[in-house]
């Protein structure tokens, strides 16, 4: 999926960072740290797109462990579009390749 930074910002701005989705995430259930939670991932990508943090291997790893189960999206009252946000990150950070499921 190809997306520009303005579109990605709009998708991220829908999120109020309420955290209601965190308990639905199987990755967060195991790791139990905020960067592995759905909210944490959106927050990280938001800071990246604003230029406040650089991309990094750690950030790529954090987003890559997503199982694309959609539990977070289904539990979000704002209908935040996780798939498009994660795909937008991979696209803008230059991480799309043949092995990337978001490509
Ligand atoms: S994605 Fe939805 S449920 Fe999760 S923190 Fe953002 S607004 Fe809240
Ligand atoms: S789609 Fe990813 S971030 Fe959302 S609940 Fe599933 S594993 Fe967690």
Image: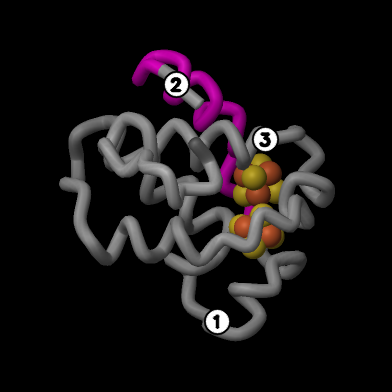
Place of residue 14 in the rendered image (x, y in percent of width and height, measured from the top left): 60, 28
The tag earlier along the polypeptide, 1 or 3, is 1
Tell me if label 1 and label 2 are in contact, CB under 8 Å: no
Q: Residue at x 72, y 53 (%)?
A: 72
**Mark found first going from the N terminus, 1 or 2:** 2
Callout 3: helix, strand or loop? loop
User: Up-down: is 25 above or below 6?
Assistant: below
Rendering coords of residue 13 (x, y %): 52, 27
How far separated are the C-alphas under marks 2 and 3? 18 Å
Which contiguous range is marked in magenta?
4-19
Q: Secondary structure at mark 2?
A: loop
Q: Which mark is residue 2?
A: 2
**Classed neighbour count for the residue bearing mark 3: other residues with Cα under 10 Å, few (<14), some (14–19), many (≥20):** many
Disc 3 under 8 Å from ligand 1? The reply is yes
Estimate the spatial distance between the alpha carbons at disc 1 and disc 3, rounded to whole Å.
21 Å
Respond yes or no on whether mark 1 lies under 8 Å from ligand 2.
no
48 sits to left or right of 22: left
User: For the view shown, which residue lies furthest in the front direction?
Assistant: 98
Q: Where is mark 1, residue-wise?
A: 32
Identified at 31% across, 43% down, the residue is 95
Residue at horizontal 75 percent and vertical 51 percent from the top: 70
**Front of the two marks 2 and 3:** 2
Indicate whether 96 appears above or below 69.
Answer: above
Left or right: 45 as drawn, with respect to 79: left
- Residue 97 at x, y percent in the picture: 36, 42
Q: Looking at the rendering, which quadrant does residue 56 occupy? A: bottom left
**In terms of depth relative to the viewer, which is nearer, 30 or 87?**
87
The location of residue 40, given as percent across then percent down, is 48, 58
Q: Quadrant of residue 28?
A: bottom right
The residue carrying mark 3 is: 80
């Amino acid at each position: 999926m190809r997306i520009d930074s303005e579109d990605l910002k709009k998708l991220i701005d829908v999120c109020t960072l309420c955290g209601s989705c965190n308990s639905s995430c199987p990755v967060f259930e195991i790791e139990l740290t905020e960067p592995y939670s759905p909210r944490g991932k959106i927050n990280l990508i938001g800071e990246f797109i604003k230029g406040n943090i650089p991309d990094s291997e750690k950030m790529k790893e954090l987003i890559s462990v997503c199982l694309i189960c959609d539990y977070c999206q289904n539990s979000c009252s704002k209908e935040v579009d996780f798939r498009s946000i994660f795909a937008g990150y991979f696209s803008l950070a230059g991480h799309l390749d043949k092995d990337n499921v978001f490509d």
